[in-house]
């Protein structure tokens, strides 16, 4: 099995279809993720991992909706095999095609709830997941101003505009916010590769079983870019 990033926060995405903008996002400890993978049903689901081994994507055809008022408790161990957990039915569009989708007061209300760091998921228009990174309130405000996919680089300890050096930019189409758990969704047109390895998406590896890995893409978009 590909090792999980130790002592890191792990993000688990679950979808019914690989190309879908409907998903469940959960924020887990590395221990919870290890326990989940120990009994993963490879015969029923697909499992993809990102380049940093701190975000896993599960495609489960049995995944279904429930009442959007239902919320996953962040204080109790998550039931990761519950196929009726809430999906992203509560996403709020805050920006679209260069303009805010809500008033300044509503935006300020949401920004007050912004945690020190939160996950930011980038998807292309087909619903393909491109990358999962982390961002601060300033990352979101910069993305709103510039229309470019903007994050916070924990390794560089500063603002990170995806592709500002390589030219592999993310031209945003829409920005969504989810409050429970708190995360941001960028819907974006991706120029070139989203992954620093040169693959179009950071989710370029599928785990077929505990020891077999296959590659989603037959070739890279380009050479290593960042």
Image (cartoon, grey):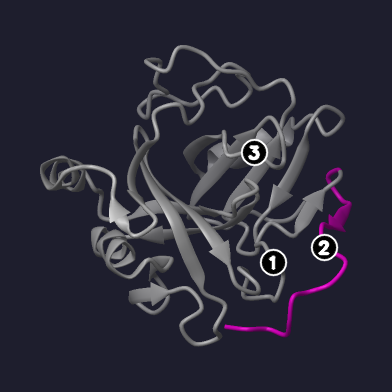
- In the picture, the quarter occupied by the C terminus is bottom right
Residue annotated with mark 3: 20
* Distance Cα–Cα, label 1 vs label 3: 17 Å
Task: Tell which of 84 and 220 is nearer to you.
Answer: 220
Residue receiving disc 2: 217
Residue 188 lies, with reference to residue 152, above or below; the image says above
Give the image quarter of residue 39. Answer: top right
Q: Is residue 91 magenta?
A: no
* Tag 2 and tag 1, C-beta contact below 8 Å: yes
Q: Nearer the viewer, residue 38 or 28?
A: 28
User: Which label is found at residue 1?
Assistant: none
Q: How far, Cα to Cα, is label 2 from label 3?
A: 18 Å
Upstream in the sequence, badge 1 or badge 3? 3
Q: CA distance from mark 2 to mark 1?
A: 8 Å
Q: Is residue 215 magenta?
A: yes
Residue 155 percent across, percent down from the top left: 42, 75
Q: Position of residue 127 (x, y in %)?
A: 62, 45
The magenta-colored residue range is 209-226
């Amino acid at each position: 099995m590909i090792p999980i990033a130790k002592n890191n926060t792990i993000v688990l995405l679950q979808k019914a279809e690989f190309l879908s903008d409907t998903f469940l996002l959960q924020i887990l400890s590395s221990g919870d993720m290890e326990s989940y993978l120990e009994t993963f049903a490879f015969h029923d689901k697909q499992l993809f991992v990102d380049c940093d081994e701190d975000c896993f994507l599960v495609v489960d055809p049995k995944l279904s909706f429930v009442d959007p008022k239902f919320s996953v408790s962040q204080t109790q161990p998550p039931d990761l095999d519950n196929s009726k957990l809430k999906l992203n039915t509560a996403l709020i569009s805050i920006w679209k095609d260069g303009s805010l989708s809500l008033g300044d007061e509503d935006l300020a209300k949401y920004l007050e709830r912004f945690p020190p760091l939160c996950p930011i998921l980038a998807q292309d228009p087909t619903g393909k997941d491109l990358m999962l990174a982390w961002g601060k309130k300033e990352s979101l405000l910069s993305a709103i101003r510039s229309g470019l996919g903007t994050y916070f680089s924990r390794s560089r300890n500063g603002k990170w505009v995806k592709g500002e050096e390589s030219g592999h930019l993310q031209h945003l189409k829409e920005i969504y916010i989810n409050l429970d758990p708190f995360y941001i969704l960028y819907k974006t047109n991706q120029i070139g590769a989203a992954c620093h390895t040169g693959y179009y998406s950071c989710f370029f590896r599928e785990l077929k079983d505990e020891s077999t890995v296959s590659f989603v893409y037959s070739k890279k978009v380009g050479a290593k870019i960042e």
